Amino acid sequence: MTLTSMRSGDSANQADDRPSREEAEAAVRTLLAWAGDDPAREGLQDTPARVARAYEEFFGGYAIDPVDLLQRTFSEVEGYDEMVLLRDIRFESHCEHHLAPIIGRASVAYMPTHRVVGISKLARVVDAYARRLQIQEKMTAQIANSIEQVLEPSGVAVVIEATHHCMTTRGVHKAGTTMVTSRMLGCFRKDAATRREFLSLIGNPPAQGMV
């Protein structure tokens, strides 16, 4: 993946012909009526506007360029080349299949070669991808790939653990389940000891599928 393609993001991020707010609110009224309620009743009159505002917050990641977030780096690190880890980054996303919430936490690590980035930027990169319609596998890869492409470290590791409401509040109704995905690049993929250190630091044993 090139920086150009990462900057372009999903096609939704490119679209400047989005429906108007009025059209979005009309669509919400249609869904309310389809659900069997009366969009004109007092309790629902302002719901379309509230939903439109909520969508601006839920999906604000389309307006954020993760590459730009990582551009400001620091090279005065006295030769530091050990693991940099930010763990337990809480995020909220939405499943692209059912628009149901995905609530979880991400742990992100990289092995710097000649520069580091402010740790808040790692959290912001997670949020930039989380605040889009997502599947967890894709989001995990996007975070790792963007860090690898911009910072050019010797390795990147990302582990995401999340609860998907599309299977806890509908469908199979399996409450309490957690999905875990990982992306290991560079030394985290090639060096078992480095991978074990990372997994130990985030509190996860080196499960069979992650070593």
Image (cartoon, grey):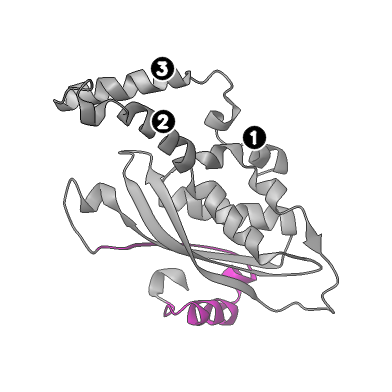
Q: Which mark is residue 8?
A: 1
According to the picture, the residue beneath numbered tag 2 turns out to be: 52
Magenta span contains residue 203: yes
Give residue 36's quadrant in the image: top left
Q: Which mark is residue 113?
A: none
Q: Which residues are magenta?
A: 177-206
Q: Nearer the viewer, residue 69 or 209?
A: 69
Measured from the top left, where is residue 144 in percent x and y?
59, 57
Count neighbours of disc 1 (C-alpha within 10 A) and say few if under 14, some if 14 to 19, many if 20 or more: some
- N-terminal of the two: label 1 or label 2? 1
Q: Are marks 3 and 2 in contact (CB under 8 Å)?
A: no
Q: Nearer the viewer, residue 121 or 133?
A: 121
Measured from the top left, where is residue 65 in percent x and y?
65, 43
Q: How much space separates mark 3 and mark 1, taking CA atoms?
A: 26 Å
The local secondary structure at tag 1 comes to helix
Residue displayed at 48% across by 49% down = 130
Amino acid type, label 3: Glu
Residue displayed at 38% across by 39% down = 96
The local secondary structure at tag 2 comes to helix
Q: Is residue 44 left or right of residue 112?
A: left
Magenta span contains residue 202: yes
Q: Is residue 16 shown above or below 60?
A: above
Q: Which mark is residue 23?
A: 3
The local secondary structure at tag 3 comes to helix
Residue displayed at 74% across by 60% down = 152
Q: Is residue 80 left or right of residue 40?
A: right
Measured from the top left, where is residue 1 in percent x and y?
65, 44
Count neighbours of disc 2 (C-alpha within 10 A) and say few if under 14, some if 14 to 19, many if 20 or more: some
Q: How much space separates mark 1 and mark 2, taking CA atoms?
A: 24 Å
